[in-house]
Amino acid sequence: MTLQQLEYVVALDEHRHYVTAAQHCFVSQPNLTMQIKRLEEEIGVRIFDRNKKPLEPTEIGEEVIIRSRQILREAKRLIEFVNHEKESMEGEFKLGIIPTLAPYLLPLFLPSFLKENPKVHLKIQELQTAQIITQLEHGIIDVGFW
């Protein structure tokens, strides 16, 4: 099950016509149809009664559509949350840098970075390349320059 499939289900419910729903999703009608059919096979129920004109959801399909809308809303909220967090960095960040780069690289970005992110507590360690890689792999430092 993918978010894309759920978007197709919601679009088909809104438009009640495969071609119109596909146009709304900027995909071909066969692709939309195939993805909805795959979703129905995966969950083991028919979401839409294709014998009725206009197209109508089945009884269980109505619940699938309601839950699909909820999932898509939550996915959107998650994206909004992450985007907000990316814009407002805060907390402790550990940076590892090799000694030969530190005096040249840090002055280029450090003052503006700290000014733009006043809630960031940056811990900088001068390390050898192998130490930086190991500490990145183990989550000991957040960023490494070598």
Image: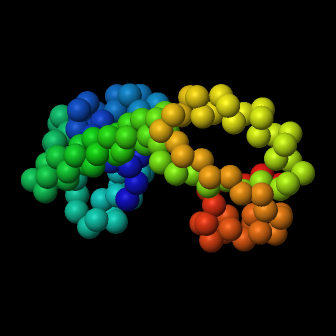
Q: Is residue 120 above or below residue 116?
A: below
Q: Residue at x 77, y 54 (%)?
A: 97
Image height of 21 relative to 41, above or below:
above
Report x, y in % for residue 3: 38, 49
Where residue 79 appears, as percent x and y from the top left, is 41, 41
Q: Is residue 46 left or right of residue 3?
A: left
Q: Quadrant of residue 144?
A: bottom right
Q: Please tell me which residue is depicted at 41% across the width and 28% down the height of the picture.
A: 23
Q: Residue at left 23%, top 32%?
A: 14
Q: On the picture, is 106 further left or further right than 123?
A: right
Q: Is residue 15 left or right of residue 1?
A: left
Figure disc tally: 0
- Using the image as rendered, state which of residue 65 and residue 145 is in the foreground: 145
Residue 90 horizontal/vertical position (percent): 47, 43
One can see residue 33 in this view: no
Relative depth, front residue between 101 and 33: 101
In the image, what residue occupies the spot 65% across and 28% down? 112
Q: Is residue 72 left or right of residue 33?
A: left
Quadrant where the C terminus is found in the figure: bottom right
- Which of 1 and 90 lies nearest the eye of the viewer? 90
Return the residue found at the far right: 100
Residue 123: image location, x then y, percent? 62, 52
Instruction: Pick the quarter of the image with the N terminus.
Output: bottom left
Asked if residue 104 shows in the view, the reply is yes
Figure coloring: rainbow
